[in-house]
Image: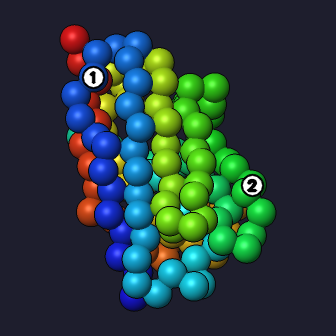
Amino acid sequence: QVQLVESGGGLVQPGGSLRLSCAASGRTFGISAMGWFRQAPGKERAFVAAIGVGRSGGSTYYADSVKGRFTISRDNAKNTVYLQMNSLKPEDTAVYYCATGGDPFRLQLGTVGSWGQGTQVTVSS
């Protein structure tokens, strides 16, 4: 079993930045991709970004709504992925969930192995 712990959420003004972290522990050997999804109030959970981890290449995928503003990165030694969020907008307000998958392409399609507990990001003045 894999445990995912997110951190880094909070309240930020429009145009500001935040960095989310997700640390994986437990049975991490089989993880080949990690990523982020988000769920705003009254909306379905949606894909944000994914990256290949471990021995897989570091291919990245992004939702169109965050391209050019968000960057996903990894630290294989720490089993941790990061989401750097810049130029934040009120519509980025959501609970952000870390997720694992078999590869980043399928992860972006919603094929998820494990979920984190989520971290709240609020963009407001």
Name the residue that disc number 1 marks: 12
Helix, strand or loop at disc 1? Answer: strand
Q: Position of residue 84 (x, y in %)?
A: 49, 36
Q: Quick check: can you spot residue 66?
A: yes
112 w.r.t. 97: above or below: below
Side (left or right) of 80 relative to 29: left
Q: Position of residue 98 (x, y in %)?
A: 41, 59
> In the orientation shown, which residue stands out farthest toward the front?
77
Q: Position of residue 80 (x, y in %)?
A: 49, 61
Side (left or right) of 58 relative to 90: right
Rounded to the nearest whole Å, what is the CA distance between mark 2 and mark 1? 29 Å
Q: Which of marks 2 and 1 is nearer the N terminus?
A: 1
Name the residue that disc number 2 marks: 59
Q: Where is residue 19 in the image (x, y as percent from the top left)?
A: 41, 38
Residue at image coords 56%, 26%: 69
Label 1 environment density (alpha carbons within 10 Å; few <14, some 14–19, many ≥20)? some
- Identify which amino acid the numbered label 2 is placed on: Ser
Asked whether disc 2 touches disc 1, contact meaning CB atoms under 8 Å apart, the reply is no
Q: In which quarter of the image is the N terminus?
A: bottom left
